[in-house]
Image (tube, rainbow, N blue to C red):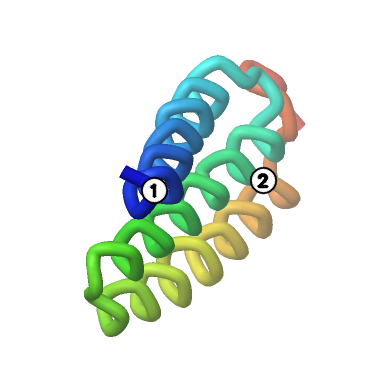
Amino acid sequence: MIEQVPQILVLLGLVASAILTYYFRDLLAATLAAGLFSFLISLEFYILQAPDVAISQAAIGAGLTTAIFIIAIRATGRFEGESS
């Protein structure tokens, strides 16, 4: 049972970050919540003993994709429905 505590905490964090990503109106906050989701997914892969997938997910999903979204938000409007 004690071995499952970290996995349960990661899964609860995944659900919470997915809900935050959906409900944020600020696109930068939603992007950061999605980045947190990607990081937690990579942590879950590591817990499931797939370190190669975890490293790929952390580098591409949490790192590169989040950076690209932040650059795109800087070029457009930060809040949903805002025009620059």
Crowd band around label 2 with a 10 angstrom C-alpha radius: few (<14), some (14–19), many (20+): some
Residue under the point 64% across and 45% down = 32
Crowd band around label 1 with a 10 angstrom C-alpha radius: few (<14), some (14–19), many (20+): few
Mark 2, residue position:
73
- Image quarter of the N terminus: top left
Residue under the point 27% across and 84% down = 52
Residue under the point 67% across and 59% down = 71
Residue under the point 44% across and 31% down = 12
In this rendering, the answer to whether 20 lies above or below 37 is: above
Residue 58: image quadrant is bottom left
- Furthest residue in direction bottom, as rendered: 52
In this rendering, the answer to whether 65 lies above or below 79 is: below
Label 2 and label 1: CA atoms lie apart by 42 Å
Mark 1, residue position:
2
* Percent position of residue 24, x then y: 62, 21
* Percent position of residue 46, x then y: 34, 70
Given contact means CB atoms under 8 Å apart, are the residues at marks 2 and 1 in contact? no
Foreground residue, 7 or 81? 7
User: Could you tell me which secondary element the residue under label 2 belongs to?
Assistant: helix
State how many labels appear: 2
Give the amino acid type for the residue marked by disc 1 in the picture: Ile
In this rendering, the answer to whether 28 lies above or below 53 is: above
